Amino acid sequence: MLPLEGTTVVALEQAVAAPFATRQLADLGARVIKVERPGDGDFSRSYDRTVHGNSSYFVWLNRGKESIELDLKDDSDRRVLDAMIESADVVVQNLVPGAVERLGLDAATLRASRPDLVHCSISGYGPAGPYRAKKAYDLLVQCEAGLVAATGTPDDPCKAGISIADIAAGMYAYSGVLTALLRRAGHGLGAAVEVAMIDALAEWMVQPAYHAVYGGSDTRRTGAKHASIAPYGPYRAGDGNQVFLAVQNDREWVRLSRGILRRPDLAEDPRFVHNPERVAHDHLITPLIESAFATLDADRVVELLDEAGIACARLRRPAELFTHPQLAARDRWRPVPAPGGVVEMLLPPVGITGLDPAMGPVPRLGEHNDALRAEFGSRREEAIS
């Protein structure tokens, strides 16, 4: 039995953050009922058509869910939704600011009659403050949290290459719901869980903020190199390929100097002996490393770094994830049905001994309309009678 079997989640969700949270609940066995707009559905369905005609975002985020189309302003559809919520353990929503309050689906309203309900709201900027009514999308929150200013080259700030603000918020919503369910199991009381994208990403940005504020200088953009640890980043091998390496402490610098660079004198050089000095003189370290790599191909460089106990990596393209030797060796992929064909999906990162995650099919828009209307429409009629 999966940990969340018997738990019902009603998801008033769209885009990335809330669907990421509820997909993980579904993987743990929860029944997740995804409420979508009639005709169009979750707008992430139309982001692209790359996975058997479906959006890569939607396929990634929505396996194992049931899809029902409901017009929340229609009385008949609203009665179906109300019946779902009456039988739900969890409600998760990330609608536009103010929408759930106007619809009477906010935590205060729903939990007034259902104090055992876990209600999770994901917003861009939180329920109060001057930004509370602003629409929030991933790149915009990256800007507001300082991530874009800290990423890229000295000349050009860049966004992160994934929806990192959405993912951060989804992860905190997921853990928040699990925490609330754990408390409810012990005390019978539900909770109102609030997660703001800016809070989630701001938590991840505290280190560079500390470094800038307490260090008294603006955050440096250093491309693929680390801004405050050196050497840590890409270095070119003799075959033209890049190898990334990371020296995390002074002991590793000594091993790199003596074993790889063949320059034992560098281990005692005052310009490099401690990390703050190495960062200040990183422009001198890069040519030293690339000179030592000049006669070696990238594969040999990786071998030597591994032997010396220096952390390193090859620069791989996203498409290579499917053939990554470590993921393949650990059998991390599973076939999952989706509209139009089967998709290889990655197992959830958290493995629990003896439990296989649910990883159910990706639903078509409204695939469960008839079944859910029959189930919850009849429940509502029974409750009234």
Image (cartoon, rainbow, N blue to C red):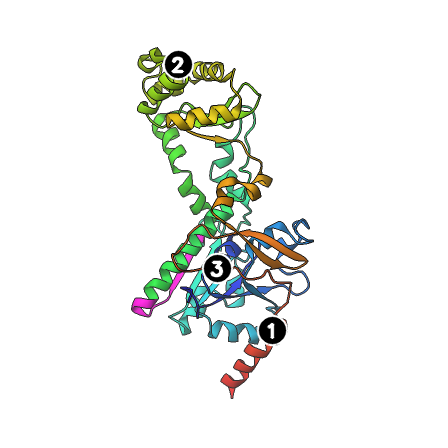
Q: Position of residue 380 (x, y in %)?
A: 53, 81
Q: Which residues are magenta?
A: 185-196
Q: Nearer the viewer, residue 373 or 263?
A: 263
- Residue ID for mark 1: 77
The three-letter code of the residue at mark 1 reads Asp
Residue 202 in which image quadrant = top left
Q: Name the residue: 37% across, 30% down.
A: 211
Q: Position of residue 63 (x, y in %)?
A: 56, 59
Q: Earlier in the sequence, mark 1 or mark 3?
A: 3
User: Which label number is shown at residue 59?
Assistant: none
From the viewer's perspective, is residue 195 above or below residue 326?
A: below
Dividing the image into 4 quarters, which one contains the N terminus? Answer: bottom left
Q: Position of residue 362 (x, y in %)?
A: 59, 60
CA gap between label 1 and label 3 equals 28 Å
- Residue ID for mark 2: 262
Residue 225 visible: no
CA gap between label 2 and label 3 equals 50 Å
Q: Name the residue: 56% across, 82% down.
A: 378
Report the mark closest to the observer, 2 or 3: 2
Label 3 crowd (10 A; few <14 / some 14-19 / many >=20): many
From the viewer's perspective, is residue 343 above or below residue 252?
A: below
The three-letter code of the residue at mark 3 reads Asp
Q: Earlier in the sequence, mark 2 or mark 3?
A: 3
- Residue ID for mark 3: 27
Left or right: residue 158 compared with residue 55: left
CA gap between label 2 and label 1 equals 73 Å
| Magenta residue check for 355 | no
The three-letter code of the residue at mark 2 reads Arg
Label 2 crowd (10 A; few <14 / some 14-19 / many >=20): few
Left or right: residue 207 compared with residue 321: left
Q: Position of residue 148 (x, y in %)?
A: 51, 35
